[in-house]
Each structure stands twice: as structure tokens, then as C-alpha cells.
Image: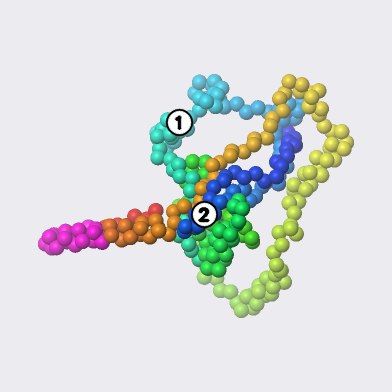
Amino acid sequence: MGVAKVLRLSFNGGMRAIWTGSIVFGLVNVPVKLYSATENHDVSMHQVHEKDGGRIRNQHRCQECGKVVEFDDMVKAYDDGDNRVILTKDDFEALPADENDDLDVLQFVPNDQIDPIMLEKSYFLEPTSKTPKAYLLLRQTLEDTDRTAIVKITLRTRTRLAILRVCGKVLMIQTLRWADEIRDVDFKGVNSQAKISKKEMEMSAKLVELYSEDFTPEEFNDDYQDELRKLIDAKIDKGETLDLEKAFPDEDEDEEPGGDVIDLMEALRKSVDSSRSSKSSKKSSSKSGAKKSGAKKSGAKKSTGSKSAKKKTG
């Protein structure tokens, strides 16, 4: 007895754009739509009571007063071990959220400098202009220069770092993890000085060669999900099911969430001119800062110590 799982049938239909806007490549405007590039193929299930097949409903209960708390009465909190800081909806609304819907290009980098460990979710960009020449121009430029654009976008009120790159015939963006989200590791074994013989290297290379071939994703299947679907079909064929209308006449059929429709990043709007002006302003400010620090040093030659300016990087 206990909790069992049952299949939850759903149909997602075709791809649906989750953002519409335009990429700005220099002075060229590229209208696009954004689509999620991946989907989950797992069988969708929910939990039921094994004894009678009734749905399990989760309740959010306060551990202090024991009462069930409605969603509208819930807020977030941060615990540091000693203190609990409660943050209300008003607190979050007061934060300087980035309301910019543009996809801002920060820099172009060589393709091989993007470590796969940083990649997260992928999105396709579809050209929507009557004449997609600008889209093709950007695609061809990235291909010919072997470059990937580093961009900053705002999705669901969160500012994310991402890359804009070519994938076959389409442009796509992939969100990135921030640098401080990648863990540093120092496993003892990787620093071992164990001696590897020439014979061992030759045998290892032969083994790799034996398994070497081109990668074709279609050759691989999720065996677990395939067998799970066969199991469910077999139970249906044997009549090992519940008639939901008869067994639970008062239970409302849950609908699949339609997904949040996001105001898509309106694209690479900060162009080369703004980038250059930004760089020149940074240089001028650094020069003025250097002059001021030089004046301070000349006036304090007899002082026993000096302070060095630290440059903060984001």
C-alpha cells in the first residue's frame, strides 16, 4: 500500500513562439521569434493513493501554527543559520529589475572558448521578415568569422548571460551559467604521479579507435521510457485501469499548464556605436583616475605606505 504513479496524458501540439522581437546587428534590424529548442519526452505522471486510485493533493502547512497556507499568503525568506529575513512581494518589486526586452550583444568571442559546462537552455530564432536577408547576413557573418556572440537577456524578470550562435541553418541562443556557479574541484586522484607505460598508452589508443565513429543521436533510445510506455499499454489492454468518470465523478480534470508567454528579448539593440562610446568613456575615466592618483602619490612621497587601486570585475 502507499503512493502509486499513474500516466497523465497530455498533448503539447506544435512549437509556439514564446517571444517576438528583433535582433539589431549594427544598423541592421532582424525581426525574429523565439522558440524553445528542446522538450521533455518522459511519460507525464502524477501520484495517487494505491488503495483506491485517488489523487494525492499537496498542502502547504505552516510548521508554527499548523494551518494550511494559501498561495497568496506565502512569501519568501532567507536563512543564514542564525537569522531569518522575510522578503515580501513589495520588497521584490522595489528592486531595480531590468525591464529591457532587448538582446544586448556584449562581445564576440572565438567559438572554441565556450565551455559546454556553462550551457543551459537552448532557443531557436526564426526570421519573421518578408525578406530574411538581414537574418542570413548575421548567420553568414558568424560562420565566416568563427565567432559566437556573448549577449545579455532578461527572461521572466531574471537577467541571464547567453550566447548567440549558428546551428545548422538557424540562429539560436543558449543561456549560460554565471562564472561563480561553476564549482572549483581539486580531486586528489587527478594529481597522482602514477607512471603510465608506453604499452598501456598503445592499448588504450587501440581501444578508443575500436569504438570510434560519428555521433548520430537518433541511434540511441531512452530504454526506460520505452519500457514504461509498453507497460502502460499492456495494463490498458488487460483492462487494469480506472474509469475516472465513474470512480471520481466530482474530480475536475487538471489541465496542462499552457506555459508562461514571455515578452521575447527584442534583440541585439546595443550596436557597435554604443559599444565604442562606452569603451571610450571607460578609457577617459581610467586616464583621469590615473592622473589623480599620480598627483596624490607626488604629494605623499614621504608617507610610509601606499594604497593600490583594485579593479573590480563582474
Quick check: 125 left or right of 242?
Answer: left
In the rendered image, the vertical position of residue 126 relative to residue 58, given as above or below: below
| Dot label at residue 29 | 2
Residue shown at the point (28%, 60%) measured from the top left: 284
Residue shown at the point (75%, 37%) measured from the top left: 9
Position of residue 308 measured from the top left corner of the image (x, y, whole percent): 25, 59
Tell me which amino acid carries mark 1.
Lys
Position of residue 15 measured from the top left corner of the image (x, y, whole percent): 67, 46
Q: Is 158 covered by the magenta stretch?
A: no
Q: Nearer the viewer, residue 248 or 78?
A: 248
Q: Which residue is mark 1?
A: 89
Residue 63 appears in the figure: no
User: Looking at the figure, which quarter contains the N terminus?
Assistant: top right
Direction front: furthest residue: 130
Residue shown at the point (45%, 33%) measured from the top left: 77
In the rendered image, the vertical position of residue 235 relative to residue 203, given as above or below: above
Q: What secondary structure is found at the residue carrying circle 2?
A: strand
Direction bottom: furthest residue: 198
In the rendered image, the vertical position of residue 162 relative to residue 195, given as above or below: above
Quick check: 133 left or right of 14?
Answer: left
Tell me which amino acid carries mark 2.
Asn
Q: Nearer the viewer, residue 264 or 221?
A: 264
Position of residue 124 measured from the top left corner of the image (x, y, whole percent): 61, 52
The span from disc 1 to disc 2 (Cα, nearest Å) is: 37 Å
**Where does the magenta region start and end?**
286-307
- Of the image marks 1 and 2, the number of the one nearer the N terminus: 2
Residue shown at the point (81%, 23%) measured from the top left: 246
